[in-house]
Image (cartoon, rainbow, N blue to C red):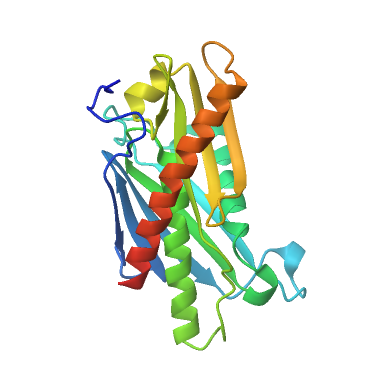
């Protein structure tokens, strides 16, 4: 089966991560996957939310947003519409949960790292690209804290990446673009660490209910794609 953009079912779009994309940020990347592009910035503050004050424990959180023209036709800014949508809140919670799974908050100390993921162009997979890019931004920010002697060692204890999978025209596929995602019988977002352990799985049957063998095929594809993304992250961080 050839997909609408010519890829094989198990083929990622072209991924690229440009680090230090925003010079004023402690850690910043532009992540591109096909036509989807997300700026991920990690900002450091020397304080924590009220529920953590005096605990000696740090915090990592995330915010997510899409530029008005990210989808081709202008959408109103959420701030102008009275507040964030349920979708936006759910995505930024997912990003935060995912990144917190690979950092020791106690070792971070009373520091907050906020990961801002801003979609400048959307063609499917924005939440998974945000997680994959936010991890690199986090590591860059931590490296800067170590250089500035604000941390003695890295509290990051693993790597993490995410990818979408689904059933499109009856075939399990990897890394759905917008056309595939909007027409898929099943779409799923998978977050995994470098040990190939699952951090989060979000899956929905949009058409027929998916079978166990289809689920296994999608998870195998996710593992294949995430392995490649982890290698890309490591390569970018080693430059």
Residue 224's spot in the image, x, y percent?
Answer: 44, 43
Kindly give the residue lying farthest to the left in the view shown: 6
On the picture, is 27 further left or further right than 70?
right
Question: Can residue 84 be seen?
Answer: no
Which of the 4 image quadrants contains residue 212? top right
Kindly give the residue lying farthest to the bottom in the view shown: 149
At horizontal 26% and vertical 44% (from top left) the residue drawn is: 14
At horizontal 51% and vertical 29% (from top left) the residue drawn is: 217
On the picture, is 148 further left or further right than 5?
right
Which of the 4 image quadrants contains residue 47? bottom right
Q: Between residue 219 and residue 34, name the one nearer to us.
A: 219
214 is higher (above) or lower (below) than 53? above
Q: How many numbered marks are there?
A: 0
Question: Can residue 67 be seen?
Answer: yes
Quarter containing the C terminus: bottom left
At horizontal 59% and vertical 73% (from top left) the residue drawn is: 155
52 is higher (above) or lower (below) than 214? below
On the picture, is 232 further left or further right than 151?
left
75 is higher (above) or lower (below) than 19? above
Q: Between residue 82 and residue 171, name the one nearer to us.
A: 171
Quarter containing the N terminus: top left
Residue 92's spot in the image, x, y percent?
Answer: 54, 45
133 is higher (above) or lower (below) than 82? below
Residue 66's spot in the image, x, y percent?
Answer: 39, 40
Residue 138's spot in the image, x, y percent?
Answer: 48, 65
At horizontal 31% and vertical 36% (from top left) the residue drawn is: 70
């Amino acid at each position: 089966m050839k997909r609408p953009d010519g890829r094989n079912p198990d083929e990622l779009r072209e991924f690229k991560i440009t680090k230090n994309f925003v010079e004023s940020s402690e850690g910043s990347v532009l992540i591109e996957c096909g036509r989807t592009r997300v700026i991920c910035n990690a900002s450091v503050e020397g304080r924590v939310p009220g529920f953590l004050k005096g605990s000696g424990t740090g915090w990592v959180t995330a915010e997510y947003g899409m530029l008005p023209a990210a989808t081709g036709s202008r959408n109103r800014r959420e701030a102008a519409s009275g507040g964030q949508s349920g979708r936006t809140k759910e995505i930024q919670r997912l990003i935060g949960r995912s990144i917190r799974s690979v950092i020791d908050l106690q070792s971070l100390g009373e520091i907050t790292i906020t990961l801002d993921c801003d979609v400048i162009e959307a063609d499917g997979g924005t939440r998974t690209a945000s997680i994959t890019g936010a991890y690199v931004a986090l590591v860059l920010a931590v490296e800067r804290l170590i250089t500035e002697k604000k941390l003695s060692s890295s509290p990051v204890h693993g790597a993490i990446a995410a990818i979408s999978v689904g059933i499109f025209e009856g075939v399990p596929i990897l890394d759905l673009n917008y056309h595939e995602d909007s027409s898929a019988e099943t779409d799923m977002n998978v977050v995994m660490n470098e040990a190939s352990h699952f951090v989060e799985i979000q899956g929905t049957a949009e058409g027929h209910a998916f079978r166990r063998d289809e689920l296994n095929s999608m998870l195998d594809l996710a593992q294949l794609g995430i392995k490649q993304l982890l290698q890309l992250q490591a390569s970018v961080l080693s430059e």
